[in-house]
């Protein structure tokens, strides 16, 4: 089983990777620094996509395209994030400039 990285450390790493790639990133909402869940908002040319942190059946970290397979408008993305924050007050929300709607960090998308 993979060791779990603290949420605050993971967010710092992802923002640094985005910065190294020349892409803007911002923490829209700080969650629990130790065990908070993470939602990533990817802002691209074609729209917005939201990724939600999950674990697969074997317990490995993965990312779910939470708003569907393609880009959505800002209102749809905001509504999804608001519902998730309401369910989980410890949730982190991080936004990345992603013209190609690909995350700037290594991610297994499901």
Image (tube, grey):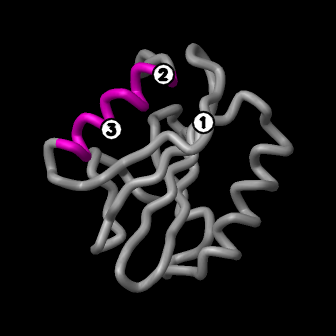
Measure the alpha-carbon separation of dots 1 and 2. Answer: 9 Å
Q: Quick one: label 3, few (<14), some, or many (20+) residues within 10 Å?
A: many
Residue at the (49%, 17%) spot, across then down: 6
* For marks 1 and 2 on the same chain, the one whose residue lies earlier in the sequence: 2
**Residue 26 appearing in the image:** yes
Q: What is the x, y in percent for residue 59?
A: 52, 32
Q: At 28% from the left edge and 74% from the top edge, which residue is drawn?
A: 100
Look at mark 3 in the image and give the residue it sits on.
15
Residue 67, above or below 62: below
Q: Is 29 located above or below residue 4 in the figure?
A: below
> Residue 93: percent from the left, percent from the top?
58, 44
Q: Which mark is residue 92?
A: 1
Q: Residue at x 15, y 50 (%)?
A: 21
The quarter of the picture where residue 30 lies is top right
Q: What's drawn in magenta, residue-wise?
A: 7-19
| SS at mark 3 in the image | helix
SS for callout 1: strand
Q: Position of residue 91 (x, y in %)?
A: 67, 35
Residue 109 part of the magenta-drawn span? no
Q: Position of residue 38 (x, y in %)?
A: 57, 39
Residue 103 shown left or right of residue 36 in the figure: left
Task: Give me the disc on residue 8.
Answer: 2
Q: Quadrant of residue 26?
A: top left
- Residue 18 falls within the magenta-colored stretch: yes
50 displayed left or right of 97: right
């Amino acid at each position: 089983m993979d060791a779990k990285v603290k949420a605050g450390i993971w967010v710092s790493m992802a923002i640094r990777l985005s910065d190294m790639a020349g892409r803007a990133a911002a923490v829209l909402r700080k969650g629990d620094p130790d065990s908070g869940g993470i939602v990533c908002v990817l802002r691209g040319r074609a729209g917005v996509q939201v990724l939600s942190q999950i674990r697969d059946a074997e317990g490995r970290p993965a990312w779910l395209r939470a708003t569907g397979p393609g880009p959505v408008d800002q209102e749809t993305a905001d509504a999804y994030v608001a519902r998730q924050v309401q369910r989980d007050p410890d949730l982190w929300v991080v936004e990345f400039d992603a013209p190609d709607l690909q995350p700037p960090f290594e991610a297994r998308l499901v």
